[in-house]
């Protein structure tokens, strides 16, 4: 088992000797061309959104550097349609506001389009474009090999309140109990426990009533674990 246990490399900026947790420092990754960073304060919220700016996210590396080279980033925007232009080539891309669906609609012309909306976003858009006839030449094999990554998520609570398990980066290690199983402990920041247990228990976003019931049950019996 010891040979199968390993530390994980994480994209988080930790304090170096002479630095404090939560201290802002000049860009340490791109020769000063990137934004200032803040060292990790151990809040444990890496998975739900770094609260201080220590996590090495896209907005602090690739997107930041792209903007400095003249690229225009349009945030909070959803692509609804991509259709080829019949005459001079290129594509027409219809977009709208992500936070206010149906609003902020406009069209962008592009010579080339790269679909990079992760596995679900890309496939959803491609399937829609194929079914609506805008990209009719997409292969019929689209989505045929889609699968989950075979994860089972277990939410666990601890009865001993004297230990703060939320402190530290979200993922620090993993182990392989056998050749087919990979276990990776993940911590979440304070305030995230009930919502995560609710999501795993209901396979959907819990209603407000369900959320409150889950929270009360968790507080009453901290020995419970929900799979």
Image (tube, rainbow, N blue to C red):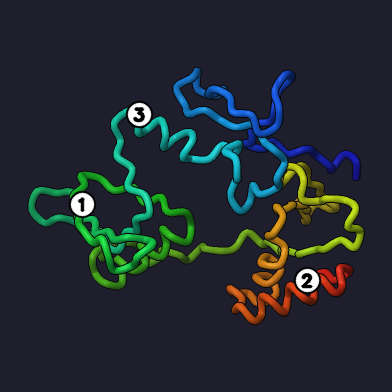
Disc 1 versus disc 3: nearer the observer = 3
In percent of the image, x 63 and y 74: which residue is there?
203
> Could you say which is closer to the camera, residue 157 or residue 136?
157
Please tell me in which quadrant of the rendered image residue 154 appears.
Answer: bottom right
Note whether 92 is above or below 220 in the view shown: above
- For label 2, the SS is strand
Q: Is residue 148 rendered to the left or right of residue 189? A: left
Q: Quadrant of the C terminus?
A: bottom right
Q: Which one is nearer the viewer's eye here, 107 or 20? A: 20
Q: Where does the image place residue 101, in percent across and percent down from the top left?
A: 33, 67
Answer with left or right where residue 63 lies relative to residue 92.
Answer: right
The residue to which callout 1 is attached is: 108
Kindly identify which residue carries mark 2: 226
Q: In this view, does 103 lie above or below 55?
A: below
Which of the marked residues, 1 or 2, is nearer the chain's N terminus?
Answer: 1
Structural distance between the alpha carbons of marks 3 and 2: 46 Å
Residue situated furthest bottom in the rendering: 209
């Amino acid at each position: 088992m010891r040979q199968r246990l390993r530390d994980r490399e994480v994209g988080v900026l930790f304090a170096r000797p002479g630095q404090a947790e939560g201290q802002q420092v000049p860009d340490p990754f791109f020769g000063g061309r990137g934004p200032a960073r803040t060292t990790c304060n151990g809040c444990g919220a890496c998975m739900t959104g770094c609260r201080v700016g220590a996590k090495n996210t896209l907005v602090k590396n690739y997107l930041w550097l792209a903007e400095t080279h003249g690229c225009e980033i349009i945030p909070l925007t959803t692509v609804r349609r991509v259709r080829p232009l019949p005459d001079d080539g290129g594509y027409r891309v219809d977009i709208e506001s992500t936070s206010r669906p149906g609003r902020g609609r406009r069209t962008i012309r592009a010579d080339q389009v790269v679909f990079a909306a992760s596995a679900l976003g890309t496939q959803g858009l491609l399937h829609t474009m194929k079914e609506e006839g805008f990209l009719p030449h997409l292969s019929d094999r689209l989505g045929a090999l889609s699968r989950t990554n075979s994860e089972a998520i277990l939410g666990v609570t601890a009865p001993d309140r004297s230990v703060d398990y939320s402190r530290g980066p979200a993922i620090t290690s993993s182990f392989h109990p056998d050749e087919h199983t990979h276990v990776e402990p993940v911590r979440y920041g304070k305030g995230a426990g009930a919502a995560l247990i609710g999501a795993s228990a209901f396979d959907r976003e819990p209603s407000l009533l369900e959320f409150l019931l889950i929270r009360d049950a968790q507080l009453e019996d901290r020995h419970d674990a929900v799979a």
